[in-house]
Amino acid sequence: YGTKSCRAGRLSYRAIEAARRAIIGHFHRAMSGQFRRNGKIWVRVLADIPIPENLHRSQNGKRKRKSYGWIARVSTGQILFEMDGVSLSNARQAATLAAHKLCRQPSLFSGRKLIS
């Protein structure tokens, strides 16, 4: 199973990590040791674009920018997370938890078939 993005936009690295932890936490609570033995999760989106922090009192002409954070550009239909070794009901609940962390509604799919 996996989750796809329904619309294009940006995701911060904090939102991606929060969604990943929510998915893993749900699987650990719902499946106890079975997920640790058989389950896998893949994060298919990477925050690779730096957001610079402008220092207001610096001189012009010299680069004095620090990286404030990282974002990922997400296109419509891009796969965000993939899950293996879990049931459909657990995958659906985990996708709902991840949607709350990502502030957007991803769709759940199995193979090429859209589930929700």
Image (spheres, rainbow, N blue to C red):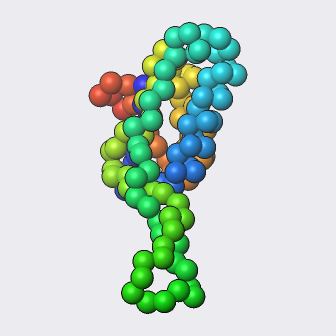
Residue at the (65%, 11%) spot, across then down = 33
Residue 53 vertical position relative to residue 71 in the rendered view, above or below: below
Q: Does residue 77 appear to the left or right of 20 in the view shown?
A: left
**Residue 8: where, in percent of width, then height?**
37, 56
Question: Which of these two is toward me, 34 or 30?
Answer: 34
Residue 29 vertical position relative to residue 18 in the rendered view, above or below: above
**Residue 97: where, in percent of width, then height?**
61, 38
Residue at the (56%, 10%) spot, across then down = 37
Question: Which of these two is toward me, 88 or 28?
Answer: 28
Which quarter of the picture shows residue 36? top right
Question: Which of these two is toward me, 111 or 36?
Answer: 36
**Residue 14: where, in percent of width, then height?**
57, 51
Residue at the (34%, 44%) spot, across then down = 78
Q: Does residue 9 appear to the left or right of 32 in the view shown?
A: left
- Residue 19 visible? The answer is yes
Residue at the (47%, 65%) spot, across then down = 51
